[in-house]
Amino acid sequence: MPLKNAVYPGSFDPITYGHLDIIERGLRIFDTVIVAVARNSEKNALFNVEERIALIREVLGNNGRAKVDTFDGLLVDYVRRQGATVIIRGLRAVSDFEYEFQLAQMNRSITQEVETLFMMTSVPYSYLSSSIVKEVSSLNGPVDGLVPPLVKRALDAKFNR
Ligand code: COA
């Protein structure tokens, strides 16, 4: 039986099948998964936040239990404002662990009301990142199977194809 609300934060520049895998599995556990696009990411973005949100909304379609939003400031403050108590994060490989451990511990030191739940990314997506998708696409390589067709079209448009 699904439980409460969870926030799945990230930069999603752009959303990939790896993220979708985590969202779909999160929806089996939680009533609502809020996909929260971080505004204050220091990363050099290809898509602006509004473009990223539009892509995620299109990809998720009419799933009333998956919401898309954006946030800035502290993640735990946003999570509390949403009335949620859980942050979902995907772990791809051991290399993700150190950073994720730091984030989760820092968030927990700010508030113990919010718990971080880690899900192991499904094997076919364990090597995926938005950066690698952007790099392959920029070099006109194949990204089918890594991102939904509408994201592939958006990447093609960004790279003037
Ligand atoms: N499948 C495929 N790829 C995945 C994935 C999955 N399941 N899970 C993560 N990734 C990739 C992402 O595509 C991303 O790739 P990129 O680096 O090439 O863009 C990378 O893994 C990790 O990025 P993401 O999950 O988007 O996290 P992030 O590090 O960009 O953002 C925030 C982390 C936004 C959650 C964090 O910075 C934050 O909480 N910021 C708010 C401010 C705050 O509260 N700071 C204090 C926190 S202690």
Image: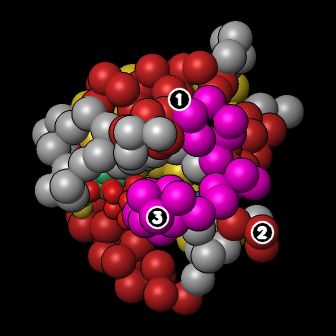
Is the image coloured rainbow, by chain, by secondary structure, or in one colour?
A: secondary structure
Q: Earlier in the sequence, mark 3 or mark 2?
A: 2
Tell me the quadrant of the picture where the N terminus can be found.
top right
User: How dense is the environment of label 3, judged by Cα within 10 Å: few (below 14), some, or many (20 and up)?
Assistant: few
Viewer can see residue 84:
no
The residue carrying mark 1 is 56
Q: Which residues are magenta?
A: 130-153
Would you call the spot at circle 2 few (<14 residues within 10 Å), some (14-19), or many (20 or more)?
Answer: few
Give yes or no for contact between labels 3 and 2 (Cβ–Cβ under 8 Å). no
Spatial CA distance of label 1 from label 3 is: 23 Å
First-in-chain label (1 vs 3): 1
Residue at the image position 38 percent from the left and 39 percent from the top: 160
- Local crowd at mark 1 within 10 Å, few (<14), some, or many (≥20)? many
Residue bearing the label numbered 2: 124
The quarter of the rendering in which ligand 1 is drawn is bottom left
Of the numbered discs 1 and 2, the one sitting upstream in the chain is: 1
Mark 2, secondary structure of its residue: helix
Q: Amino acid at mark 1?
A: Ile
The amino acid sitting under disc 2 is: Pro
Q: Residue at x 62, y 76 (%)?
A: 127
Residue toward you, 58 or 38: 58
Q: Is mark 1 within 8 Å of ligand 1?
A: no
Please name which of the two marks, 3 or 2, marks the residue nearer to the observer.
Answer: 3
Q: Residue furthest front?
A: 161
Q: Quick check: 14 above or below 143?
A: above
Disc sitting over residue 139 in the figure: 3
Labels 1, 3: front one: 3
Q: Secondary structure at mark 3?
A: loop
Q: Is residue 139 left or right of residue 43?
A: right
**153 over 139 or under it: above or below:** above
At numbered mark 1, what does the secondary structure look like: helix, strand or loop? helix
At x 74%, y 40%, the residue is 24
